[in-house]
Amino acid sequence: MISIDPKQTSERDNYKLLIGTVIPRPIAFVTTQSEDGVVNGAPFSYFNIVSSNPPMVSLAIQRTNGLKDTARNIYNNREFVVHIVDDENVEKINKTAASLPATESEIELANLTPIQSEIVSVPGIKEAKVRMECKLVQSIPFGGDGPGSDLFIGEIVRFHIDETIYKDGRIDTRSLNAVSRLAGSNYATIGNIFSIERPK
């Protein structure tokens, strides 16, 4: 067993250890809107559930030379839309990871279709089977010696679920076919599914 002190290694080396071991990671495709009305879209795999009462999700956005557009927009208007990445939209969504100026929309670059939200002002995209309109509950900036990050907790104020994956109040895992993030350029789809009964 190798023992590593994260304070004695670089931020990049710690990053590689994290993304190589905390797998698979769900991917949130997040849309936000700038003060000038530009719709920004970007994928993030530092993403998970926080609570079901009320329903909340977490999103951590790493800093590279300051705030990313998504983080800046969330701080400014306190709204965002989270989409689940699946096997049918992953190619287009991957294109939105390109570095664009804040004045250009990744949605347009990837030929994704904006769709109006019901509660928040930020549009979502039509190509996702799951879309969650979120309002910011809490934001926590993290510093450190490296670039740092910003953690956002959002309350889901509206779910939009494709009828093809929804039955009797549950999501059909295979029909959703969510894609997860691994390390490097690697992704994974849902493979073998097995059940283990939880102890009483």
Image: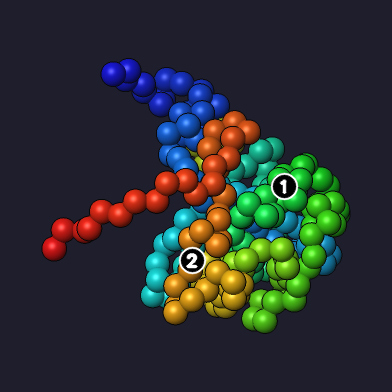
Q: Is residue 11 visible?
A: no
- How far is the residue under mark 1 from the one under mark 2? 22 Å
> Looking at this view, is 45 or 12 the one in front?
45
**Residue for point 69% across, 38% down:** 65
Percent x, y of residue 54: 42, 75
The colouring scheme, among rainbow, by chain, secondary structure or one colour, is rainbow
**Image quadrant containing the C terminus:** bottom left
Mark 1 vs mark 2, foreground winner is: 2
Percent x, y of residue 24: 47, 43
Mark 2 element type: loop
**Residue for point 45% across, 78% down:** 169
**Image quadrant containing the N terminus:** top left
Residue sticking out furthest to the top: 2
Judge left or right: residue 196 versus residue 40: left
Please rate how many residues cluster around mark 1, counting C-alpha atoms within 10 Å: few if below 14, some from 14 to 19, many from 20: few
The residue tagged 2 is 172
Judge left or right: residue 149 versus residue 98: left
